[in-house]
Image: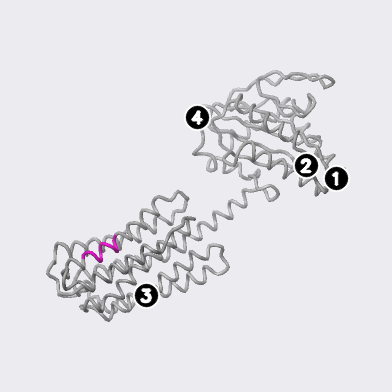
């Protein structure tokens, strides 16, 4: 039978082995100084083992079962190392025991092929390889991390999986009376073409996968406040992406918080103490509202919490927990106890919040925060609810509720902004 596309099978094996070694070198350099070094180590090891298998196969076309025992075992081990690499990359634990056991199983099957039959052993060997590849594909598909390159890897493994399934059918159905476990036929040509596609695509997409995560990590750093680790003001532009899957179309509450008399902390205890006060407040926010909410530091001592799916009553309960916790958990700095309190304003929306509507909701919450400051601080004010004046404080003001998306009046916005400069 003429080779498909005039391919020389021995040369194709060697070219694939060379390509595997080239990517192994690329993985080695890519992993230098990286935190996820185990991912790169597994990839390098798998490529070296695959390259050894292909080099041995190039010399054993139409070879005996004994000749093919080592290269087939190498294929199983190489796929096991790929599985380990992917599981490690996505933060999962896995054991090497199962693929080492599979390689022993393959070796024993090849050893007893005169008894079991060449076609059956050929089919079983390729079935084990196909099952490993499918397990890798399923693992990639089930991952939730938004890395588009994993779909490229699924394609890369899918190409060689299809070829392996075809060889399973060849051994178990089409050619049960085959004489060799590596026959030089059209199916081998197809398998070598699929292998070349897989080696090139899996190598490129494995590098791309790590690059995408690196870029995503840098982007997350850009959206985080360096002092507290909370989101920063720039993250508002990416708000839909951050909380989109948690949006509840019925309602959203926003809590705006400002540390009371923060300038006094800096003036009396120094700016380092001020930084510690901000971190302390951020820690309390995380404890009360949880890591799953959108919590951001949007000014020097000003924080915002967005609560998708929460109404005003629920937001008030959480805000009061935050206010009380901060009041009764003073900051201890260099042996000194620094009492901290906060004023909070709450506004709600009956529609999903994006970067634009967030700004409008923030302005409305700022009017409530202004009222809390004006009425004596260390209190919560809610949009649409009258304040309860405290003894010895400035008389209350009332901020009327606004319809979703309706901006505050010019006079109110100006009052809020001028007050924000003073606090």
**Who comes first in sequence, dot 2 or dot 3?**
3
Separation of marks 1 and 3 at Cα, in angstroms? 65 Å
Q: Kindly report which numbered mark, 2 or 3, lies closer to the viewer in this rendering.
A: 2
Q: Is residue 314 above or below residue 120?
A: above
Position in image of residue 258 (x %, y %): 73, 35
Secondary structure beneath label 1: helix
For marks 1 and 2 on the same chain, the one whose residue lies earlier in the sequence: 1
Say whether marks 2 and 3 touch (CB < 8 Å). Answer: no
The mark found on residue 269 in the picture is 1
Q: Residue at x 53, y 32 (%)?
A: 352
Whole-angstrom CA distance, mark 4 to mark 3, is 54 Å
Q: Secondary structure at mark 3?
A: helix
Left or right relative to 395: residue 283: left
Query: How far apart are the two marked residues, 2 and 4, measured between alpha carbons?
Result: 38 Å
Q: SS of the residue at dot 4?
A: loop
Instruction: For marks 1 and 2, give the one nearer the viewer.
Output: 2
| Nearer-N-terminus badge (2/4) | 4
Say if mark 4 contacts mark 1, CB within 8 Å.
no
Callout 3 environment at 10 Å: few (<14), some (14 to 19), or many (20+)?
many
Point 57% across, 54% down: residue: 217
The residue lying toward the viewer, choosing from 271 and 172, is 172
Q: Which residue is mark 4?
A: 249
Q: Residues within 10 Å of mark 1 (few under 14, many from 20)?
A: some
Q: Which residue is mark 2?
A: 331
Tell me where residue 267 appears, x and y as whole percent: 86, 43
Which residues are the magenta region? 123-130
Q: Could you say where residue 116 lies in the image, as x and y percent from the top left?
A: 17, 68
Is residue 129 on the magenta stretch? yes
């Amino acid at each position: 039978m003429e080779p498909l596309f005039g391919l020389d099978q021995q040369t194709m094996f060697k070219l694939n082995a060379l390509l595997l070694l080239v990517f192994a070198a690329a993985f080695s350099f890519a992993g230098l100084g990286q935190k996820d070094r185990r991912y790169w180590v597994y990839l390098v090891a798998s490529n070296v083992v695959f390259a050894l298998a292909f080099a041995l196969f190039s010399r054993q076309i139409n070879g005996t079962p004994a000749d093919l025992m080592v290269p087939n075992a190498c294929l199983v081990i190489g796929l096991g190392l790929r599985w380990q690499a992917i599981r490690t990359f996505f933060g999962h634990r896995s054991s090497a025991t199962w693929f080492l056991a599979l390689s022993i199983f393959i070796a024993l099957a090849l050893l007893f092929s005169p008894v079991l039959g060449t076609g059956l052993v050929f089919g079983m060997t390729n079935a084990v390889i196909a099952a490993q590849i499918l397990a890798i594909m399923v693992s990639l598909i089930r991952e939730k991390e938004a890395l588009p390159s994993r779909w490229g890897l699924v394609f890369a493994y899918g190409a060689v999986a299809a070829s392996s399934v075809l060889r399973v059918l060849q051994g178990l159905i089409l050619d049960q009376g085959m004489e060799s476990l590596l026959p030089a036929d059209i199916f081998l040509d197809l398998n070598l073409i699929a292998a070349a596609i897989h080696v090139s695509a899996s190598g490129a997409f494995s590098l791309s996968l790590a690059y995408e995560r690196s870029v995503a990590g840098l982007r997350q750093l850009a959206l985080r406040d360096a002092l507290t680790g909370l989101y920063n003001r720039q993250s508002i532009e990416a708000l839909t992406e951050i909380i989109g899957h948690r949006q509840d179309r019925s309602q959203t509450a926003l809590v705006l918080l400002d540390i009371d008399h923060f300038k006094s902390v800096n003036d009396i205890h120094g700016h380092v103490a001020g930084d510690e006060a901000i971190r302390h407040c951020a820690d309390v926010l995380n404890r009360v509202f949880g890591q799953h909410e959108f919590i951001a530091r949007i000014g020097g001592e000003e924080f915002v919490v967005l609560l998708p799916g929460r109404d005003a009553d629920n937001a008030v309960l959480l805000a009061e927990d935050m206010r009380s916790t901060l009041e009764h958990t003073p900051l201890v700095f260099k042996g000194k106890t620094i009492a901290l309190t906060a004023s909070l304003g709450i506004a709600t929306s009956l529609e999903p919040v994006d970067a634009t509507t967030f700004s409008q909701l923030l302005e409305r919450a700022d009017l409530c925060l202004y009222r809390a400051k004006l009425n004596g601080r260390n209190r919560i004010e809610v949009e649409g609810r009258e304040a309860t004046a405290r003894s010895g404080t400035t008389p209350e003001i009332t901020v009327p509720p606004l319809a979703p998306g309706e901006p505050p009046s010019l006079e109110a916005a100006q009052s809020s902004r001028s007050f924000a400069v003073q606090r």
